[in-house]
Image (cartoon, rainbow, N blue to C red):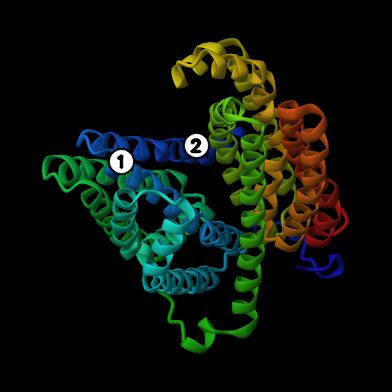
């Protein structure tokens, strides 16, 4: 991070941020995020057609364990985006390539470790789920096969991060759609028509990741134009490697804490009773859906803020923060109104239980407003990731988590399920506000006093 007195304020790297620029990144990324759940639905439908309950249970359990393992490595995508965006803003082509190769090497190394640890991950998953032997066997098959593609899957995270860092959101969308389309088609073919079941679905994912990695690398390398010779000494330069590792470490801690917050919400809801946990599970889908849209604008500000920091161009930074936050707020408000108005019908699609429906409807306004209370948290996350202010991002997440735990147990004790939802809102608000309050100091350090 540069101090104010050393900042070059020249406008040589100036660029304009408009609504069109924001939407050109946010819209494709939103679509990309929305296509991901479709894959899980198709896989479930494919295995469900085989009329084997144990196999279906094994797929569901295996997918949970796989998602938990791979969510931990999302720092490869987020970390690459911020660093590439800054190098792109500074017009440092050599640095862009070095960052890509470092991140790729890290992703492949992590993937090989996952492949090696596949038997242990499977055993841990079977212990954690505690299902019947038939379900555990299907889950073991799914996990072991899916993890064979781990190096390529994590390489695809890096490729996506690189493309997003360069602002090539439409190309990133194309790759994400490609992965999902290939995966869906091969899942239907191998899992259903060849009757390979869970193994067919898992191999389909491996094949799709492989195809996407090959095409993605081709796109990235062709975008390099001229590949700049990079020595091993340059690639392993201690300051650059340290920066990459520290940034990724902070994002990893932030991700684990975020996952822990939602796990605690589910755990406390389960203690209230079967009806409450079922209702909460349905209502959480509304937060997940609005998060896809907010993540699209968070991705936009991540790229634009990172590029602005790299270019040392404050007007672009301020405009990106303003426009993405306004767009996020408008979308969250619209989503909240639509959810309240049509939420009863939507809840009926998820369950036929009268008790669960009534319970979910009771807390519908609280679930519908999570987008509004969370919009600042989403946008600040994007800003901090793009600007690579990871230590503050980590610290504010830990602070918010402590406040959340206190609210969860106090309000949950006195207000039951109302208390749990209020605690979740407090968590979202504290995350956003704490990061917003820290923003002026970091902005001044990055760009200097204007």
> What separation in Å lies between label 1 and label 2 (alpha carbons)?
29 Å
Instruction: Name the outermost residue toward the left.
Output: 194
Q: Position of residue 388 (x, y in %)?
A: 67, 61
Q: Report the side of 337 relative to 393 (left or right).
A: left
Identify which residue is drawn at 43% across, 59% down. 159
Residue that badge 1 annotates: 56
- In the depicted structure, whether residue 322 falls above or below residue 356: below
Q: Position of residue 350 (x, y in %)?
A: 46, 21
Q: Residue furthest bottom?
A: 233
**Residue 12 can be seen in this image:** no
Q: In front: 449, or 419?
A: 419
Write the residue at 61% across / 39% down: 266
Check disc 2 and report its element: helix, strand or loop: helix
Q: Residue at x 79, y 41 (%)?
A: 409
Task: Where is residue 51? Give x, y as percent.
Answer: 21, 34
Q: Residue at x 33, y 48 (%)?
A: 135
Side (left or right) of 164 relative to 331:
left
- Residue designated by label 2: 30
Secondary structure under badge 1?
A: helix
N-terminal label among 1 and 2: 2
Q: Is residue 8 above or below residue 435?
A: below
Q: Are marks 1 and 2 in contact (CB under 8 Å)?
A: no
**Residue 322 location, quadrant:** top right
Left or right? Give the position of 127 relative to 57: right
**Residue 6 appears in view:** yes
**Few, some or many residues within 10 Å of mark 1 (<14, 14–19, 20+):** many
Q: Quadrant of the N terminus?
A: bottom right
Compared to residue 220, the image places residue 169 above or below, namely above
Could you say which is closer to the camera, residue 431 or residue 332?
431
Rendered location of residue 10, percent (x, y): 74, 60
């Amino acid at each position: 991070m540069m101090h104010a007195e050393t900042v070059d304020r020249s406008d040589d790297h100036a660029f304009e941020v408009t609504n069109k620029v924001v939407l050109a990144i946010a819209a494709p990324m939103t679509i990309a995020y929305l296509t991901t759940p479709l894959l899980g639905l198709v896989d479930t439908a494919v295995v469900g057609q085989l009329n084997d309950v144990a196999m279906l249970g094994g797929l569901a359990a295996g997918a949970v364990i796989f998602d938990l393992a791979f969510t931990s490595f999302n720092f490869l995508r987020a970390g690459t985006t911020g660093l590439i965006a800054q190098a792109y803003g500074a017009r440092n082509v050599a640095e862009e390539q070095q960052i890509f190769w470092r991140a790729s090497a890290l992703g492949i190394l992590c993937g090989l470790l996952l492949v090696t640890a596949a038997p242990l991950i499977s055993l841990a998953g079977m212990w954690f789920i505690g299902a019947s032997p038939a379900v555990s066997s299907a889950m073991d098959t799914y996990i072991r096969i899916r993890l064979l593609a781990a190096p390529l899957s994590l390489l695809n995270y890096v490729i996506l991060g690189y493309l997003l860092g360069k602002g090539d959101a439409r190309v990133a969308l194309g790759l994400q759609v490609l992965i999902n389309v290939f995966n869906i088609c091969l899942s239907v073919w191998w899992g259903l028509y060849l009757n390979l079941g869970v193994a067919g679905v898992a191999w389909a994912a491996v094949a799709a990741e492989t195809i996407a990695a090959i095409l993605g690398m081709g796109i990235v390398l062709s975008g390099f134009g001229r590949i700049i010779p990079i020595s091993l000494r340059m690639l392993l330069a201690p300051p650059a490697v340290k920066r990459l590792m520290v940034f990724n470490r902070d994002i990893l801690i932030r991700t684990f804490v975020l996952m822990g917050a939602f796990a605690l919400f589910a755990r406390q809801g389960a203690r209230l009773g079967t009806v409450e946990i079922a209702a909460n599970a349905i209502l959480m889908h509304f937060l997940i859906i609005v998060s896809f849209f907010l993540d699209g604008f968070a991705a936009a500000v991540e790229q634009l803020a990172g590029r602005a920091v790299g270019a040392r161009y404050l007007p672009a930074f301020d405009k990106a923060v303003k426009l993405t936050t306004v767009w996020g707020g408008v979308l969250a408000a619209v989503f909240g109104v639509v959810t309240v108005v049509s939420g009863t019908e939507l809840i009926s699609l998820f369950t036929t239980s009268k008790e669960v429906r009534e319970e979910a409807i009771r807390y519908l306004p609280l679930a519908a407003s999570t987008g509004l209370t969370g919009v600042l948290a989403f946008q600040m996350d994007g800003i901090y990731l793009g600007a690579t202010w990871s230590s503050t991002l980590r610290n504010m997440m830990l602070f918010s988590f402590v406040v959340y735990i206190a609210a969860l147990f106090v309000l949950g004790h006195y207000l039951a399920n109302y208390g749990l939802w209020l605690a979740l809102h407090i968590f979202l608000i504290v995350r956003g506000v704490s990061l917003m309050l820290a923003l002026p100091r970091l902005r001044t350090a990055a760009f200097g006093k204007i």
